[in-house]
Amino acid sequence: MSATPDAAAGGPAGGGSTKRRKALAIGLGLALVAGAGTGGWLLWGRGGNDSAPKKKTTAGPIDAKLDWMAPVPDKDKKNADDFPPPWFTKDTIVLATRYAVTAYSRESGKQSWTLPVSGRVCSTSTGSDGGVAAVVWGKGEYDCDKLMAVDIENGRQLWSQDVVDSRGRTQGRDLANISVDHGKVTLVDVVGDPYVYAARTGKQSKASDYGCQQQGSVVKGSGQLTLAQCELITGRQFILNVDPKSGQEKWTWKVLNGIAVQNVISVSPAVLVVGRENDTSASDIVTLDGKGRMGPLISVSAGPYDLDACRPRHLDSCRRVVTDDRTLYLATKTDKDSLNSIAAIDLATGKPRWTAPLGGTRTNRPLAMHEGRLLVYQEATEEEGGKLLSVDPATGDSRVFMNLPQESAERERTLAHMGSAYFRDGRFYIVSDIGMTDSMMIMAFH
């Protein structure tokens, strides 16, 4: 994206839902006239911070051991399905596979409970709220037309029902964005109205009316960003900053002509991945200030930054990018001219603060903010286990925070290559993102 937009294009859009609803209605009318009758927790890319600042420590590195591993269930060993990200409770890590939702003790790795699914799991909510997570499933291989809420603290199904539109029809929802927050489960597909249910009872309620077609929301704490398409002909999108409790809009950003929002990296500050319309490749990272005004574009297509793990149109899927209040941390790509590094980008200026190679030939991935410093996961090599590095966010200087054992390096390397990493309460987890990559799907270190 070569041109910097003018203030009107890049700033907050005025008029609220009434004008957007009018624009949508005009778009629908034009289409008819034209004869159109013929639509968590701390982890890679979640940018999670500890709930409160902790005293910084300078103790030596932790020599971790492999606590336990969890095998891929027998029914999943022949399927190359994507595994959704896990949920964490106080005592367990919970993972949905093709035919069940299962909790493993974080201490021992033993199964705490398993909840069979009477069909196939299609997708899940990225996060949970109040001990409730949501699962889209179907009885047939590609049905994906049912929604289930799971009590992940106690391992029981709260409710399950067909997802039926206003005309009484059911259809697959495997590409829908699903969120669980503030006592509600919300399912938003690329077409049609959102579906909103009480998390504990499944009672359906009316979605908030923003005068547009909602395409998904990401909620983190007290903040919510909602993506909506408000002009049918142009495909023009808007980002709404919404109070998740009241549904009231705080500000609206009119997405620039010719681009589409692909991912939400962070809610506060608002950091988005965008790409050109009808293109699944990321082109830029956009930052918005507290009033919805756009900051400098951070080029991805022209720059060395690696966003390959972000899934287009799955809003909350960037697992290898971390943010704090001032800085965006992401990996650079490895090519014949340069090795993989970690870059820190100033959100106010869009310019790099520093770039740190860190690990020579090792692959480096941002993991989380911890005790005011950036944690980076370095994958294992053939000769040595992986490491967690603690990086000074001001300078990029690093020290070893945790050494992973050499004895499990080969398996760690295999699982991490097609998996995600998570750090929680002093434990480090690698969880497979896809079946058939290894006989194990979880490794836990402490």
Image (cartoon, rainbow, N blue to C red):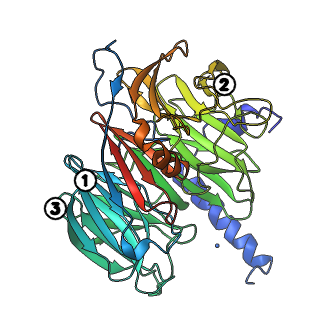
| Residue receiving disc 2 | 350
**In the image, residue 412 above or below residue 197:** above
Mark 1–mark 3 Cα distance, whole angstroms, equals 16 Å
Residue 45 image position (x, y, % from top left) = 50, 41
Q: Position of residue 125 (x, y in %)?
A: 40, 59
Residue corresponding to mark 3: 154
Query: Distance between the Cα atoms at labels 2 and 3?
Result: 45 Å
Q: Nearer the viewer, mark 1 or mark 3?
A: 1
Q: Quadrant of the N terminus?
A: top right
| Quadrant of the rendered image containing residue 341 | top right
Residue 316 in view in this figure? no
User: Which sits in the foreground, 431 or 158?
Assistant: 431
Please tell me which of labels 2 and 1 falls first in the chain: 1
Query: Residue 373's quadrant in the figure?
Result: top left
Q: Residue visible at 34% across and 12% down?
A: 58
The residue that mark 1 highlights is: 109
Q: Nearer the viewer, mark 2 or mark 3?
A: 3
What is the secondary structure assignment of the residue under circle 3?
loop
Of residues 397 and 269, which is closer to you in this image?
397
In this view, the residue in front, 236 or 128, is: 128
Identify the residue at horizontal 34%, vertical 28% (top origin).
63
Assign a secondary structure to mark 1: loop
Label 2 or label 1, whichever lies nearer to me, is 1
Compared across the picture, whether 243 is left or right of 319 comes to left
Q: Residues within 10 Å of mark 2 (few under 14, many from 20)?
A: some
* Three-letter residue code for mark 3: Asn
Q: Mark 2 to mark 1: distance in Å? A: 43 Å
